[in-house]
Amino acid sequence: MFSLYRLRRLRSPIIRLAKRLDGGTLELGFLRRIFREYHDIDVGVYSYGGCFNATRVAGGTRIGKFCSFASHVYIFAANHKLGAVTTHPFIYNPSLGIVSEDLREYHHVQIGNDVWMGQNAMIMPRVSLVGDGVVIAAGAAVTKEVPPYAVVAGVPAQVVKYRFSEDVIESLLEIQWWNWEPEKIFSLHKEFNSANAFLRIAGRM
């Protein structure tokens, strides 16, 4: 079935089947393999949602673990050519039959772990990094690098606050809980509701 995915008319049913084969879990191993090998979109384990849409997420995108994406998010790697006489894609898009190759400059983003991206949020070309723990509000247009655990909103997106104090952020980045074994992570599910309680428990483990 994996090899059949190269037939475009079969892609939608194969994706639906892949989700069923993965048993409704957030591991989605088969689906991650499809997006990594066919679309060059690398999605970390337990991340879910709109990251699995190759028409809205640019190839070359790298997404961390435990990310939550709304169903309609957009991640762009290239833009129209502003310095050319026209911004129309006939001068750079080979599928229109005028040029033989796409000469635009592409930029690919690395999205951290535990990132929440709201409905209709966008990451624009030239953004290279979205840090761990970031929240991108619905409708936001990210145009520059976002520091860890920032909450950004607006067009263009600006930092409106940080989720935690500097000390807590530093501790969370140091322990990198998303890299723990799943059994350890899920055994602490109650402690995840309080950063301070979580860090106290994590410090004893």
Image (cartoon, rainbow, N blue to C red):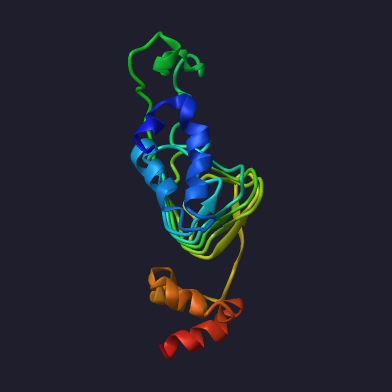
Residue 94, percent across and down?
Answer: 39, 16
**How many marks on residues?**
0
- At 56% across and 84% down in the image, what residue appears? 196
Q: Camera-side residue: 121 or 52?
A: 52
- At 41% across and 9% down in the image, what residue appears? 97
* Figure check: 149 above or below 108: below
Residue 179, percent across and down?
Answer: 38, 69
- At 64% across and 44% down in the image, what residue appears? 155
Residue 50, percent across and down?
Answer: 56, 45
* Figure check: 42 above or below 39: below
* Figure check: 177 above or below 82: below
* Figure check: 165 above or below 28: below
In this view, the residue farthest toward the top is 98
Indicate the quadrant where residue 36 lies.
top left
Residue 17, percent across and down?
Answer: 50, 42
Q: Is residue 83 visible?
A: yes
- The N terminus, quarter of image: top left
